[in-house]
Amino acid sequence: MSKVNDILENKVMPVAAKIAGQRHLQALRDGIILTMPLIIIGSLFLILGNLPITGYPEFMARTFGDAWRTKLSYPVGASFDIMALIAAFGIAYRLAEKYKVDALSAGAISVAAFLLATPYSFMFQGEGMKKAIEVSGGVPTALLGSKGLFVAMIIAMVSTEIYRFVIKKNIIIKMPDGVPPAVSKSFVALIPGFFVFLVVWLARLLIEQTSFESLHNIVGELLQKPLGVLGGSLIGGIIAVIFIQLLWSCGLHGAAIVGGVMSPIWLTAMDQNRIAFEAHQELPNVITSQFFDIFVYLGGSGTTLGFVLAMLFFSKSQQSKQLGRLAIGPGIFNINEPVVFGAPIVLNPLLLIPFILTPIVMVIVTYVAMSTGIVPKPAGVAVPWTMIPIIGGYLATGGKIAGALLQIVNLVIAFLIYFPFFKAWDKQNYKMEQGS
């Protein structure tokens, strides 16, 4: 076991720490998080528009008119349909903060550059129309939402790098000392913003001469689709979980680090399910953000709620009993730092085995249950990751009891996997307390 610890400490941890400290990955993670409050608010209205209660649609129609569901969808569109726009601002803002340049200006320039890269025309085919027509003079909301998320990420990072580079070269307009700081900053951003616009504009003109026609099409064909296939597959889900758990094993927040790369894929899949759910169509994706947050990571990364329950009810040592009592409260809300660092699980070869193995089994069980139709797929409702079990599964599947039952099954499986390792660990603690 000491050899395993040496490998983790001397080989894995330095590499993992460098990845965790990479400014672009941190900016991606923190910038995308900015969209989550809006998405959760929109999801609340999505739930209200689709409550699985007998007689509910008829009651709402009598009370608020036949268009009640359409009106409830207004906040849904106002939140989900600007996901990429908010991300373009948030990612640029966070990256500029790390470069210690004016973050507000960088965020504003990024949003404008994203709109510059987005075509102001789209094909529209309404109900009853035989042929689609081209509509110009407006930005398609699909490209401002999840479909434009990858483009927003790229534009945000490129525009901020250009902005930072021009400022670093001191190619700026300096105002006299007496000018208010807000005015002075806006003039400082003038020349860097011009260069950002120039680069994006020229890139758009060049791309329009190709068969792709827009940056969105290039990203969709060359990046988003391949990554979406990998991230939406069972193998991709298992790989993501393995990376998350290995990072956690070294004391690094694996979900946050891997999420910086995978969140756009899973958020896009979630939004596709949301659109299908609103239209009462078959949901296209099994793996979304809620697949992991609600069904795999019960109690937090590592599905540690099973371990906490074992401590709470079957501990012999005082250390295990006390830790179980302390960890059960946060664990119910999927917060596992008390047990990960309190047991500890980090750098503990005995507990790392179930810590890595359990979420892999959860991915397989959940994927099979949903892909075979035993349990409904995630309905595109952005249930907060802190939602307590049973309620979370019910809401995430659009109000289906099967979602809650799957969480219970997963929790039982997690408990059974952790239990033999818990007994060995608890026995060690008990012997130490007895002085033997």
Image: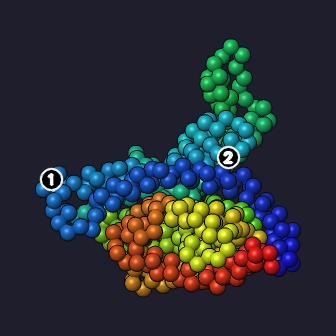
Residue drawn at (46%, 75%) of the image: 407
Tell which of 285 and 132 is nearer to you.
Answer: 285
Image x and y of residue 393, in percent? 42, 70
Q: Which mark is residue 95?
A: 2
**Proximity of marks 2 and 1: CB atoms separated by less than 8 Å:** no
Viewer-side label of 2, 1: 1
**In the picture shown, does residue 171 fall above or below 413?**
above
Q: Which residue is mark 1?
A: 63
> Residue lying furthest front in this view?
434
Occupied quadrant, residue 373: bottom left
Question: What distance separates the C-alpha of mark 2 from that of mark 1?
Answer: 48 Å
Image x and y of residue 76, in percent? 36, 54
Q: Amino acid at mark 2?
A: Leu
Residue drawn at (35%, 68%) of the image: 398
Q: In the rendered structure, which disc, 2 or 1, sits on the residue that comes first in sequence?
A: 1
Q: Count residues near mark 1 (Cα–Cα under 10 Å), then give few for <14, some for 14-19, many for 20+.
A: few
Q: Quadrant of the N terminus?
A: bottom right
Q: Amino acid at mark 1?
A: Thr
> Is residue 347 visible in this depiction of the protein?
yes
